[in-house]
Amino acid sequence: MSALNIFLLVLMFVSGIITVLLVLMHSGKGTGVSDMIASSMYNSAAGSGVWEKNLDRLTVISGIIFGLSICIMALTFPLGVIG
């Protein structure tokens, strides 16, 4: 496996974990884990719109990085090689 594929594997793993965490941090419509995390991280009266907008941007960026790393990995990964 080449250095590019190792880098892409690490990037895919890290961006996948970050994407999952960012999605879980979004405020939901009901009472759940996301509401508990969101209420402890910021006060809803103090700039929650800015926080949500930045959270949306980070989620989209990490999702795009995850998707691009998968596409590049599919094109460059050698066939028949595992581990």
Image (spheres, grey):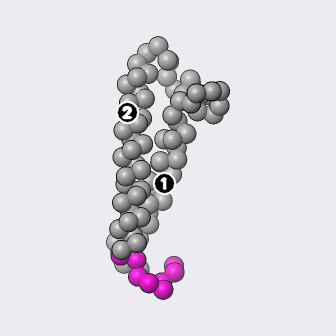
Residue 37 visible: no
Q: For the residue marked with disc 2, what is the amino acid?
A: Asn
Furthest residue in direction top, as rendered? 45
Q: Give the image location of residue 30, x and y in percent.
A: 63, 27
Please state which of residues 28 and 37 is positioned toward the viewer in this rendering. Answer: 28
Which residue lies under the disc numbered 2? 54
Which residue lies under the disc numbered 1? 16
Q: Which residues are magenta?
A: 76-83
Residue 82 visible: yes
Q: For the residue marked with disc 1, what is the amino acid?
A: Gly
Please state which of residues 13 and 23 is positioned toward the viewer in this rendering. Answer: 23
Furthest residue in direction bottom, as rendered? 80
- Picture layout, residue 39 above or below residue 54: above
Question: Residue 73 falls in which quadrant of the image?
Answer: bottom left
Question: Residue 69 falls in which quadrant of the image?
Answer: bottom left
- Picture layout, residue 46 above or below residue 28: above
| Cα distance between the residues tagged 1 and 2 | 18 Å
